[in-house]
Every structure is written in C-alpha cells, then in structure tokens.
Image (cartoon, rainbow, N blue to C red):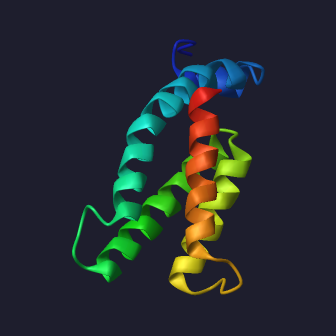
Amino acid sequence: MNMHDPVTRIQTQPDSVEAVLVPIRAKFRHALVDHIGAFEALLAGNTSDDPTATLQDIAARSHKMAGVAATLGFSELGKVARKLEATILGSASEEDPHVLAEALLAEMRTAAAS
C-alpha cells in the first residue's frame, strides 16, 4: 500500500481528506484571480461581438465554477454559480442574470481572499 498516494491516504485515513484538500483549495483560490478577470471581461462585452456566444461562455464557466467550488467547500460560491448558469440556460427565470453575475464576482473575490 502506497501511503504517499492521495487516494490510498483518503481510504485508510479519513482525517487526511482535509490535509489533501488544503493545497487544492489554495490552488483554486489562486486561480480565482484569473477567473475573476475572465468573468469581468465577459460581462463587459470585451470578448465577443456575439451576445449569445458570450452568454454561453458565461454559462459554461459558471457550470465549471459551481462544480469545483462546491467540491472544494466553497458552497456559497457554488450556489451562486449554479443559479447564474440556470438563469442563463432558462431553467430559472426569477433571477436577474446581471445581479447574479455581480454576486458571483463578489463570491469569487471573497473566496480568493480567504
């Protein structure tokens, strides 16, 4: 049994799950700086002349953000990203996508600073 393998450590030492996630969360927080810039550019319309393509890009990025954030323990970030994605894709019509996009950026900034 290779105890240096993260999967083996998780299976044999459940307390080590948190230890394995610590550097992954740190890397995610660091990467959020780039994601924030990308979202800001998309929201400003600086990436495409096609609004439909821009919305699809925001939805795809929100989908990825929702999954990764939730997995790594950034639950509020994941929730807001999921709401934004659902709103853009039309399955949640009660929310204003602009308000959700700003909320997502705020959550990203909070997570990056944590």
Residue sitting farthest toward the left? 49
Q: Say which of 68 and 110 sits in front.
A: 110
Q: Answer left or right for 67 relative to 32.
A: right
Q: Say which of 8 and 71 sits in front.
A: 71
Residue sitting farthest toward the front? 44
Q: Answer left or right for 3 relative to 47.
A: right
Rendered-image quadrant of the N terminus: top right
Q: Residue at x 38, y 39 (%)?
A: 34
Q: Answer left or right for 93 relative to 27.
A: right
Q: Residue at x 57, y 12 (%)?
A: 3
Give residue 72's position: percent from left, percent from top: 63, 39
From what the image shows, is residue 53 above or below residue 90? above
Q: Say which of 7 and 43 sits in front.
A: 43
Query: Can residue 17 be seen by looking at this rendering?
Result: yes
Rendered-image quadrant of the C terminus: top right
Give residue 15's position: percent from left, percent from top: 78, 20
Give residue 48's position: percent from left, percent from top: 23, 69
Give the quadrant of residue 47: bottom left
